[in-house]
Image (tube, rainbow, N blue to C red):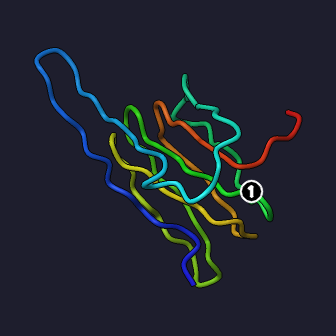
Amino acid sequence: MAVFRKINLKTFQTRGFNLTPVEFKDVVPFVIKRLYYFDSFKPADKTGAHCHKIEEEFFIQAKGASTAIIDQGQGIEEISLQPGEAIYLLPTITPIEATTLKIMMNFCDYVRSI
């Protein structure tokens, strides 16, 4: 069973910017309780492979590109994400690592102390 689903978000190009609206009710199958985002990411750094046994997550690639490295028990998979693409991750014991990202937003259904 797949632990993720990749989603292409509709982006509208205008005269001075790109606009990507997200209707959460159409793409996120849980109630969003927290938003956090990554930025100022150095190419040599990594986010730290880890997993969540409870938390569902929805990542949106906002700027730049990233690679989600996912192990579903069948070996490592690299999922490329470009601006306007998103990935939904089910609760799992699967390690997730993101590399080479610029700005990525993460919406989740679980709130805990940081």
Residue 14, position as x, y percentages in the image: 14, 23
In the picture as drawn, the residue positioned furthest to the front comes out as 25
Residue at 48 percent across and 56 percent down: it is 87
Total count of labels: 1
Quadrant where the N terminus is found in the figure: bottom right
In the image, what residue type sits under mark 1?
Glu
In the image shown, does 50 or 34 lie closer to the viewer?
34
Residue 34, position as x, y percentages in the image: 69, 37
- Can you tell which quarter of the image residue 95 is in? bottom right
In the picture as drawn, the residue positioned furthest to the left comes out as 15
Residue under numbered circle 1: 55
Q: Is residue 55 left or right of residue 76?
A: right
In the picture as drawn, the residue positioned furthest to the top comes out as 16
Quadrant where the C terminus is found in the figure: top right
In the image shown, does 11 or 31 lie closer to the viewer?
31
In the image shown, does 97 or 33 lie closer to the viewer?
33
Q: Is residue 107 left or right of residue 104?
A: right
Residue at 71 percent across and 65 percent down: it is 91
The residue carrying pointer 1 sits among few (fewer than 14), some (14 to 19) or many (20 or more) residues within 10 Å by Cα, namely: some
| Helix, strand or loop under label 1 | loop
Residue at 19 percent across and 34 percent down: it is 12
Residue at 55 percent across and 26 percent down: it is 39
- Can you tell which quarter of the image residue 75 is in? bottom right
Residue 112, position as x, y percentages in the image: 86, 40
Q: Is residue 100 left or right of residue 31?
A: left
